[in-house]
Amino acid sequence: MNIKELDEKYILPTYAKADVAFVKGENATLFDINGKKYIDFTSGIGVVSVGHANRRVTEALREQISQITHISNLYYNLPQAKAAQRVVEASGYDMQCFFGNSGAEANEGAIKIARKHGERDGEIKRYKIITLNHSFHGRTITTVKATGQESMHNYFGPFPDGFVYADGIDEIESLLDDHTAGVMIELIQGEGGVEPQDREKVQALAKLLKEKEIPLIVDEVQTGCYRVGEFTASQAYGIEPEIITLAKGVGGGVPVGIVMTTLKNVLSAGDHGSTFGGNYLSSRAVCEVVDILSELKKSGDLESRSLIFNQALETFYKKHQDIFTQKVGFGMMCGLRVKDAETLSNIIDGARENGVMVLKAGRNTLRFLPPLTITKEEINEGFEALCIAVSRL
Ligand SMILES: *Cc1c(COP(=O)(O)O)cnc(C)c1O
């Protein structure tokens, strides 16, 4: 049986898959099963932040695998403690970490911390979590309910209670009450369509929530780990959230989810856990990824790559104003609004046929999440291929 037949026979059909199978990668370059080459402007939805088959990550993992990969969270684990140190120091916040395996799991942990914090603080039980419309927080029963998209609440109920959706940052204040345990936002909505929030409004919200002692949870699963230039988008926005979640790019391709918080004394032994979370393998990956990217940041290379990428994107956008209506995003989390959804899906298919991988976000946004280590040559090659694909529409 070929891959497609095997997949159709044994894999549940939860994804609409494109007709391609990759076997090898090198930085932002991919090769499929037929040896065809592609430039990767997706990094697997913002995961492979340090590029495919990164030499340093590969070496670290190879060394770790040959020694020990897993022994549960019942014992001390040096790579995990070091990974937490790396992440906390890179953020500049006075926080502690909990390690899980995915973005949804990180957000579950964040909600648990906010709710237990709300229960401890006074007689009134605080349980409500306010999130935004068009948000995306994950696929578990709780995080799908936290996601402010009605279309995702069609099945799977009954859901956990207490999720309230605000129509933008402006509306949050009017929804706060004595039962509010936390407010969870993405600073740049990813799946929702590369939608950055307004900096002043976010700062005002953060200040208001501090006054009311309601934790601000920033879901940085997509924006985190230098995707937007700083280690967290929260730093770029100049705010100090009580809880931040990370996943995607922070493991560089190894599954990991992290909740980090200033609320260090809320959870105690037995309140939360994860069998795989923070094992030697994923923790070593986190250490290496954060080291690589913080060195890239210090050298100025992170910024110059982002600049080159954005200039190339701007040129591409200007050339095709009949198709694209707006350029959006921050750092290496960018998008182009496309005039209609059908054109968008044609662009993505055409791009793949011409050897460049791009993503969709929301209804009408062409999304770019390249590896942060992408080279100038890869950027130019990718946009050349994209130009050809678009001119053939
Ligand atoms: C991808 C994503 C998630 C879910 O992460 P998983 O690892 O798929 O569970 C949550 N929040 C945001 C902002 C994301 O982009």
Image (cartoon, rainbow, N blue to C red):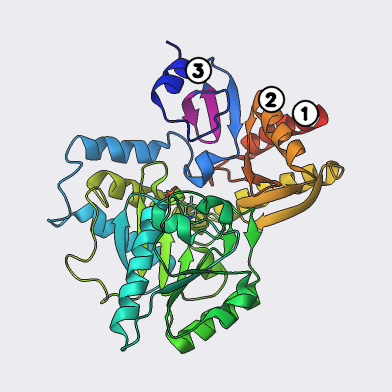
Q: Position of residue 269 (x, y in %)?
A: 17, 67
Please tell me which residue is depicted at 30% across the width and 46% down the height of the picture.
282
Q: Who comes first in sequence, dot 3 or dot 2?
A: 3
Let me know if residue 220 appears in the view: no
In the picture provided, is 296 more to the left or to the right than 125? right
Q: Is residue 278 left or right of residue 77?
A: right
Q: Position of residue 339 (x, y in %)?
A: 80, 45
Identified by mark 2, the residue type is Asn
The number of numbered discs placed on residues in the rendered structure image is 3
Sooner in the amino-acid sequence: mark 1 or mark 3: 3
Report if residue 48 is visible in the image.
Answer: yes
Residue depicted at 13% across the width and 56% down the height: 74
Give the amino acid type for the residue marked by disc 3 in the picture: Ile
Q: Disc 1 marks which amino acid?
A: Ile
Compare residues 238 and 164 and report the one nearer the observer.
Answer: 164
Closer to us: 257 or 330: 257
The span picked out in magenta is 22-31
> Which circle's residue, 2 or 1, is located before the other in the chain?
2
Image x and y of residue 203, in percent: 58, 78
Q: Which residue is mark 3?
A: 33
Residues packed near mark 3 inside 10 Å, few (<14), some (14 to 19) or many (20 plus):
few
x 58%, y 43%: residue: 370
Between the C-alphas of marks 1 and 3, the distance is 23 Å
Hey, which quadrant is residue 122 in on the image? Answer: bottom left
Which residue carries the number 1 mark? 388
The answer to whether residue 362 is left or right of residue 165 is: right
